[in-house]
Image (tube, rainbow, N blue to C red):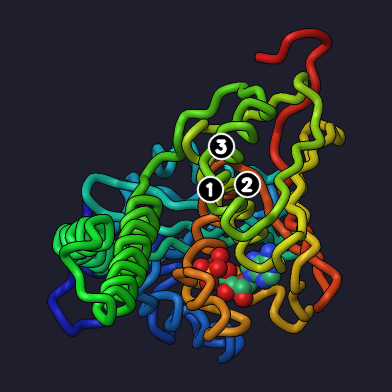
Amino acid sequence: MTGRPPSGAPVFGSVSGAPSGVAAAAGPPTPAVEGVDADAALAKVIVGLSPNGVLVTDASGLVRTFNQALCRMVPLVPDPIGRTPIDALPIPAIAEALSPGRTDEAEFPLHVGRIDLLVRVVPLGAGLGRLCVVQDVSRLRQAERYRQEFVANVSHELRTPATAIAGFAETLLHDPELLAPPAVRMVETILRNSRRLTDLFDDLLQLARLDAMDTPPPLQELALKAVVDEVFDKHAAQAVERRIRLVASLSDTIWVLAHREAMQHLLGNLVSNGIKYTEAGGEVQVRARPRHAGVIIEVIDNGIGIDPTHHERIFERFYRVDRGRARSAGGTGLGLAIVKHLAKSMKATVEVRSRPGRGSTFRVWIRGGESGGASA
Ligand code: ADP
């Protein structure tokens, strides 16, 4: 089926094993194309030499042309020209994306055997059918997997000694007889920094796990108020230490379609940021209300705020508005990147509204609603 050409040779329809009709797209400007516009002939050669698989349907949705690269990536029948896409290649997702009725663009990953593919389908214009481009991204995906595994392994390995250092520093500080007074400040610094390291490794591990996740986490209907209460409990000590009031303004009847742990992490990171970037005496509030087929959750603080020039970038890994302040507040620079990732895994979106000195509102839109009585 694959008809791989001799290495280095251009791939054209005459190569043995190629499905018939491939020359229609891939042939060089031979006498058969004499008189045809030179640009069109050139386009055919380019499509034929493309490392990406190409398939074009006509206005009635039948296969009009394709190239040899496609034959190497997907199981194409020997004579696909003039067939419906599902008859030409038995992959329902591609056939569906090539339906003649569709006018939108589609992009999706596809696994064929051990090959990772990225499929893009676009309309060619009125009366012209659709174009499908298939890219082999196996090497790219493998490199990504190696990187994720490496980060996860390094974080895991380094977390263990960092935890031990923090543990011993804590023990020393708890026993006043073990330390001479001048050493106390130093051991406190050791404890603070080793905790920062374990936080950083935890966040890196979590991001690596999220990156590596092939399928989204299973979602269920969750009572949001219970999750918010758990998050507040977890951050109560941090809030007391920084003299920040935590306020939950939402009804018990609001539910969201979410993964409990993912939701706890997401809201936990936003609440923790609210606490970190608000002056003592301030407030962090979580509000929620149903909206259309979903729920809008807002984490609102009256803290230092964020200039709009940074709004897009704060969700990037390691981006901080004020590096010094974020460090001293105990930030890793990964919290919002994790929030964005977690939101995406639950088909939710997150955005920020903030002005310097006027506090920040992080707004999460997620599927859910309000039940009549006790929530799910
Ligand atoms: P960090 O661990 O540094 O807090 P995040 O990814 O959670 O990293 O946030 C990125 C940056 O966005 C922070 O360093 C901070 O500058 C800014 N930021 C996040 N949340 C808030 C907030 N509630 N108020 C003000 N600034 C914030």
Residue type, mark 2 in image: Gly
Residue type, mark 3 in image: Asp
Provide the residue designation for mark 2: 61
The image's mark for residue 237 is: 1
Is residue 340 or residue 11 the one in the foreground?
A: 340
User: In this picture, is 288 found above or below 37?
Assistant: above
Instruction: Tell me the SS state at disc 2.
Output: loop
Q: State the image quarter where residue 198 is shown.
A: bottom left
Instruction: Tell me the SS state at disc 1.
Output: helix
Q: Earlier in the sequence, mark 2 or mark 1?
A: 2
Foreground mark, 1 or 3, reads 1
x, y percentage for residue 362?
73, 57
Bin the neighbour count of mark 2 within 10 Å (Cα to Cα): few under 14, some 14-19, many 20 and up: many
x, y percentage for residue 97?
58, 46
User: In this picture, is 216 found above or below 326?
Assistant: above
| Marks 3,2: beta carbons within 8 A | no
Q: Earlier in the sequence, mark 3 or mark 2?
A: 2
x, y percentage for residue 243?
67, 57
Provide the residue designation for mark 3: 233
Is residue 160 or residue 365 the one in the foreground?
A: 160
Marks 2 and 1, how far apart in space? 63 Å
Q: Is mark 1 within 8 Å of ligand 1?
A: no
- Quadrant of the image where one finds ligand 1: bottom right
Task: Report the residue that reaches farthest toward the top.
Answer: 373
Q: Residue at x 76, y 25 (%)?
A: 254
Q: Specify whether 272 is left or right of 330.
A: right
Task: Report the residue that reaches farthest toward the bottom.
Answer: 38
